[in-house]
Image (cartoon, rainbow, N blue to C red):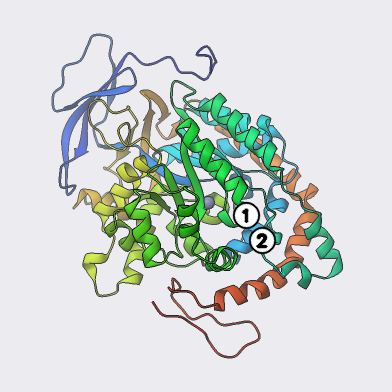
């Protein structure tokens, strides 16, 4: 992209954060330190730093100086659908996709992206891997609107249009036949974008946006869910990712339904199938990865693949408990994400860290050494997520020669008083409201808790207007998806009760209409 576009920041020549506190090596306490930024890079960290004349000075007393948190998995399009769901499974969520997304204008896609980007910045997140979508797929204009929104607000992002060439209902053999004729006509009337137009969309997006906004925006390839992709389209995605040297990110066995339907379709697990397609490698990111077998986990670790763990969304949708400890032990790079706000309610990485730590205790009640502690949760939200974004050398730590993505968080607030242990306070106690200043690529984008790059009040008002319009105009689609829900639930019960090598639920499966709980053991 041309460097004279209005949202390309003029780099700050030099900036110093004085008198703040950085984490010590063990993470148990803070030590007083200055931090000097030259242009968009961290130049020096230490006490009593000297700095060039003309340097902008920011008083960091009373603040922890932290690396910006990194969200390994989210969805820009979800933000306009925040709080529209309650007791939905993942399949209910996907089934309502047309109701939530159909007919959005490119500007509404932009507004949806901005809502999420603003929320992330205000909660101390400076980078995100965003798989944004639309029905049936984002137009090139909508994709550009989302990327422009991220560029404009000043956050760092890896962006990928999330696309598939198979309609959800047709990936569930027998479901459409269960529907009454009116609903069957609705389900059969939905169409996917043709493979050739998706290929053009992905290729054009990578060409236009990979490395844009002075390198702050990167592109990736995102076949949304393997079960909704033909083998030909998945192969195209793998080829494009390799050809352009960008990441390949997909939802991986998020629900048991997906894992079971993969077994039925390919006669092997989804991970084995992706391996056979050449999809797995150090550039591969699997989101959620709840229903993986022990062999799947070993294979991902062996191939140096990454996983984006989304604990709050997995809980919200009842998807199950992801085998995070096993993945970390097998050498899988496990970063942390929020997922979209329709399924996780917010994009707070602090909540994601706390959720990841707490959920780990459900799986291993008496093996405390297998729990995710505050140190592991912090690592997942910083350096490990940076690895998921393909930016391990650039972000996720406050070292010289890293990008200046920095968060100042007040530690002299009631929420962290008394400050007994630094990382425990950050992961378990620190509320988002303590984030005071956020710097991305050397530029101050949040000051005193307010975003400096955009008129937040105007965006909020436009988001409400867009959500109101969509709720009105898509009322018929909502009605159809709501009416399909009981049939979908009945259909999915078969998948939930089907034999599978592992059990990731915390309770037994009760089949609708049946009276005997069914469960499979690890
Ligand atoms: Zn997702």
Residue ID at (76%, 66%): 176
Categorize mark 2 by other alpha carbons within 10 Å: few (<14), some (14-19), many (20+): some
Query: Relative to residue 395, is residue 92 drawn left or right?
Result: right
- The span from disc 2 to disc 1 (Cα, nearest Å) is 6 Å
Q: Secondary structure at mark 1?
A: helix
Residue occupying the far front of the picture: 276
Counting from the top left corner in percent of width and height, residue 319 is at: 51, 65
Question: Dots 2 and 1: beta carbons under 8 Å?
Answer: yes
Compare residues 32 and 340 and report the one nearer the observer. 340
Is 144 rendered above or below residue 256?
above
Q: Secondary structure at mark 2?
A: helix
Counting from the top left corner in percent of width and height, residue 205 is at: 58, 30
Residue ID at (49%, 31%): 244
> Circle 2 is placed at which residue position?
171
Residue occupying the far top of the picture: 53
| Disc with the residue nearer the chain's start (2 vs 1) | 2
Categorize mark 1 by other alpha carbons within 10 Å: few (<14), some (14-19), many (20+): many
Counting from the top left corner in percent of width and height, residue 220 is at: 50, 37
Is 123 rendered above or below residue 173?
above
Query: Relative to residue 137, is residue 261 drawn left or right?
Result: left
């Amino acid at each position: 992209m041309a460097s004279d576009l209005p949202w390309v920041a003029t780099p700050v020549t030099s900036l110093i954060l004085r008198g703040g506190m950085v984490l010590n090596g063990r993470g148990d306490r803070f030590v007083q330190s200055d931090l000097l930024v030259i242009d968009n890079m961290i130049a020096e960290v230490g006490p009593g730093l000297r700095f060039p004349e003309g340097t902008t000075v920011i008083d960091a007393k009373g603040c922890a100086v932290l690396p910006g948190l990194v969200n390994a998995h989210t969805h820009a399009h979800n933000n306009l659908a925040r709080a529209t769901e309650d007791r939905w499974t993942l399949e209910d969520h996907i089934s309502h996709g047309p109701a939530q997304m159909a007919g959005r204008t490119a500007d509404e896609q932009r507004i949806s992206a901005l809502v999420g980007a603003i929320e992330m910045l205000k909660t101390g997140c400076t980078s995100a891997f965003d798989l944004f979508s639309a029905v049936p797929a984002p137009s090139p204009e909508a994709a550009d609107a989302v990327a422009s929104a991220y560029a404009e607000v000043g956050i760092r992002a890896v962006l990928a249009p999330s696309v598939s060439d198979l309609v959800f209902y047709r990936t569930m053999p027998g479901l459409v036949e269960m529907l009454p004729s009116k609903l069957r006509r609705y389900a059969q009337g939905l169409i996917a974008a043709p493979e050739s137009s998706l290929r053009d969309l992905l290729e054009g997006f990578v060409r236009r946006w990979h490395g844009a906004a002075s390198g702050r925006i990167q592109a990736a390839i995102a076949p949304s869910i393997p079960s909704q992709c033909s083998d030909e389209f998945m192969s195209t995605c793998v080829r494009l990712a390799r050809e352009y040297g960008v990441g390949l990110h997909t939802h991986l066995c998020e629900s048991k339904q997906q894992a079971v339907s993969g077994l039925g379709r390919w006669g092997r697990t989804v991970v084995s199938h992706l391996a056979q397609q050449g999809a797995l490698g150090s550039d591969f990111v699997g989101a959620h990865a709840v229903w993986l077998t022990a062999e799947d986990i070993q294979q991902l670790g062996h191939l140096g693949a990454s996983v984006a763990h989304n604990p709050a969304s997995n809980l919200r949708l009842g998807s199950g408990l992801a085998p995070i400890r096993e993945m970390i032990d097998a050498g899988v790079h496990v970063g942390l994400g929020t997922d979209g706000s329709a399924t996780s309610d917010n994009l707070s990485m602090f909540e994601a860290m706390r959720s990841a730590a707490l959920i780990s205790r459900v799986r291993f009640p008496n093996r405390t050494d297998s729990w995710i502690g505050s140190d592991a949760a912090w690592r997942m939200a910083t350096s490990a997520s940076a690895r998921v974004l393909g930016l391990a050398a650039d972000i996720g730590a406050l070292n010289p020669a890293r990008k200046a993505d920095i968060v100042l968080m007040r530690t002299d607030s009631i929420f962290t008083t008394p400050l007994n242990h630094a990382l425990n306070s950050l992961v378990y106690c620190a509320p988002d409201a303590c984030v005071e200043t956020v710097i991305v690529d050397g530029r101050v984008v949040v000051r005193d808790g307010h975003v400096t790059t955009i008129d937040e009040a105007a965006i909020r008002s436009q988001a409400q207007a867009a959500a109101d319009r969509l709720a009105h105009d898509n009322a018929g689609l909502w009605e159809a998806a709501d009416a399909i829900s009981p049939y979908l639930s009945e259909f999915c019960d078969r998948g939930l009760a089907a034999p599978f090598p592992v059990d990731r639920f915390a309770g037994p499966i009760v089949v609708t209409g049946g009276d005997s709980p069914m469960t499979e053991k690890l």
